[in-house]
Image (cartoon, helix red, strand yellow):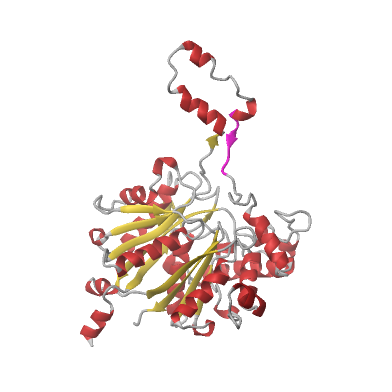
């Protein structure tokens, strides 16, 4: 039996452990730190807690969306800052909100192909220190100035420039392909699917209440790493984004944030700008056994999808979920734990409605029957991105970690992780609880 188990675990990818520094609203706990600092703390904390010899790590992959030019390969810089051996290759991936999902699935690929046995996969993001550039016309002038040789060249520097050309250029939150913000797109999508403002506020309230409960009950402690922030190095112990005291009355008073005055998306039912970092140890199951480590879950199958970014920007999970379930011969009733990224309450409710729609199944999925209804007592039970926060590059690894922890906490067998992303993309992955 031992030999059979060893053979079965050859090249099987598992998550041994995963953790994150507490997510913080941008401009608060981590406002003076770089994404590099956050990534370093997550890596350092997870390696220290796991007890693994860092020399056993074969590869490091981290997600990051808004990258600092000084640390463009932030995975490498964070790993070096965390004191990991400089002989470990590291690279950074970016795929909008599913960047660290890609980091995790890339780790799975490396293990299945035999190229690695231990991979550290995660992500990092700061919205407190985004890169702000000069405008294009002024940037061109500055680049041209490197070739200036005479005083007359310098005297012509400002020729053709207007005062507005000297203003800073803040990164756009619009979709490059459509010119529309994600909030505007979600507002239109929610209206098309008949998702009311009340339903969105009710879902947001649920997310905040569940995050508060999970925090108070200590359920999130296994995935949290204290973050010592300079200069006083007083440790940040928990997320600061959830609102335990929020209510339907408070949420209903908020004005539309994107489409005014009749939109339904508000600051209260949207995820907020967040700083944070996550990390996970993805291993070959056989290697974990050799190291005397007990994995949490097998990382089974996964998929990525892409749709029209204008009309279906945030519907990725509604396409990825049935594709993955069909591939594995599963149905929604086989899943014990659901962890879906919450970009907006309107987005989540639209995805859930689409999955339970015969019309959507026929017209969009080419299926005879709807995918089905996801039971809410299994869905995002410890809060989600609306309440815990959403550091773009780090959320995916959080979802995988939470799903694995919930499988053990709730004595489940299978978990489904799913997320949408900018550009009209989506992702889904199935985890299977590792037998004790």
Q: Quadrant of residue 277?
A: bottom left
Which residue: 59% across, 45% down?
Answer: 172
Which residue: 45% across, 43% down?
Answer: 68
Q: Is residue 295 above or below residue 73?
A: below
Which residue: 50% across, 74% down?
Answer: 323
Q: Nearer the viewer, residue 386 or 134?
A: 134
Residue 415 in view, yes or no: yes
Horizontal and vertical percent position of residue 165: 60, 29
**Quarter containing the C terminus:** bottom left
Horizontal and vertical percent position of residue 428: 48, 70
Q: Is residue 148 left or right of residue 241?
A: left
Q: Nearer the viewer, residue 352 or 126?
A: 352
Which residue: 28% across, 80% down?
Answer: 8
- Say if the magenta span includes residue 170: yes
Q: Is residue 106 left or right of residue 429?
A: left
Q: How many marks?
A: 0
Horizontal and vertical percent position of residue 376: 60, 78
**Quarter containing the N terminus:** bottom left
Q: Nearer the viewer, residue 64 or 312?
A: 312
Q: Nearer the viewer, residue 220 or 365?
A: 365
Residue 267 in view, yes or no: no
Q: Residue furthest right?
A: 261
Q: Is residue 249 above or below residue 78?
A: below
- Say if the magenta span includes residue 269: no
Q: Quadrant of residue 196?
A: bottom right
Q: Is residue 216 left or right of residue 162?
A: left
Q: Is residue 103 above or below residue 322?
A: above
- What segment is highlighted magenta in the picture? 166-171
Q: Quadrant of residue 359?
A: bottom right
Horizontal and vertical percent position of residue 202: 68, 70
Q: Is residue 277 left or right of residue 247?
A: left
Q: Residue furthest bottom?
A: 1
């Amino acid at each position: 039996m031992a030999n059979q188990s060893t053979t079965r675990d050859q090249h099987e990818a598992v998550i041994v452990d995963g953790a994150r520094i507490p997510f913080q609203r941008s401009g608060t706990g981590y406002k003076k730190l770089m994404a590099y600092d956050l990534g370093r703390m997550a890596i350092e904390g997870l390696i220290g807690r796991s007890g693994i010899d860092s020399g056993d790590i074969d590869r490091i992959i981290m997600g990051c969306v808004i990258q600092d030019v000084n640390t463009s390969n932030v995975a490498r810089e964070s790993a070096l800052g965390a004191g990991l051996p400089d002989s470990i290759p590291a690279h950074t991936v970016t795929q909008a909100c599913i960047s660290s999902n890609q980091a995790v699935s890339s780790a799975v690929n490396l293990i299945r192909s035999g190229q690695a046995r231990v991979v550290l996969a995660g992500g990092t993001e700061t919205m407190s220190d985004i890169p702000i550039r000069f405008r294009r016309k002024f940037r061109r002038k500055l680049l041209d100035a490197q070739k200036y040789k005479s005083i007359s060249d310098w005297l012509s520097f400002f020729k053709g420039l207007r005062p507005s050309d000297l203003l800073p250029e803040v990164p756009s939150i619009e979709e490059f392909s459509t010119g529309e913000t994600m909030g505007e797109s979600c507002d239109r999508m929610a209206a098309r699917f008949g998702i009311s403002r009340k339903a969105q506020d009710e879902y947001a309230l649920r997310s905040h209440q569940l995050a508060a409960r999970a925090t108070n009950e200590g359920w999130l402690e296994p995935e949290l790493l204290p973050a010592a922030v300079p200069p006083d190095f007083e440790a940040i112990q928990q997320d600061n984004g959830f609102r335990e005291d929020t209510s339907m009355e408070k949420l209903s008073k908020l004005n539309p944030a994107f489409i005014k005055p009749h939109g339904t998306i508000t600051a209260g039912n949207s995820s907020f700008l967040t700083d944070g970092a996550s990390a996970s140890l993805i291993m070959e199951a056989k290697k974990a056994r050799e190291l005397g480590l007990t994995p949490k879950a097998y990382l089974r199958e996964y998929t990525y999808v892409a749709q029209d970014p204008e009309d279906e920007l945030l519907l990725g999970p509604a396409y990825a979920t049935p594709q993955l379930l069909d591939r594995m011969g599963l149905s929604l009733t086989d899943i014990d734990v659901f962890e879906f990224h919450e970009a907006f309450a309107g987005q989540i409710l639209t995805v859930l409605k689409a999955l339970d729609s015969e019309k959507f199944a026929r017209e969009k999925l080419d299926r005879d029957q709807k995918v089905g209804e996801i039971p809410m007592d299994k869905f995002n039970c410890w809060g989600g991105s609306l309440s815990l926060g959403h550091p773009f590059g780090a959320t995916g690894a959080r979802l995988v970690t939470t799903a694995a922890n919930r499988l053990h906490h709730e004595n489940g067998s299978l978990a489904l992780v799913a997320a949408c992303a900018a550009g009209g993309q989506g992702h889904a992955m199935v985890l299977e609880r590792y037998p004790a």
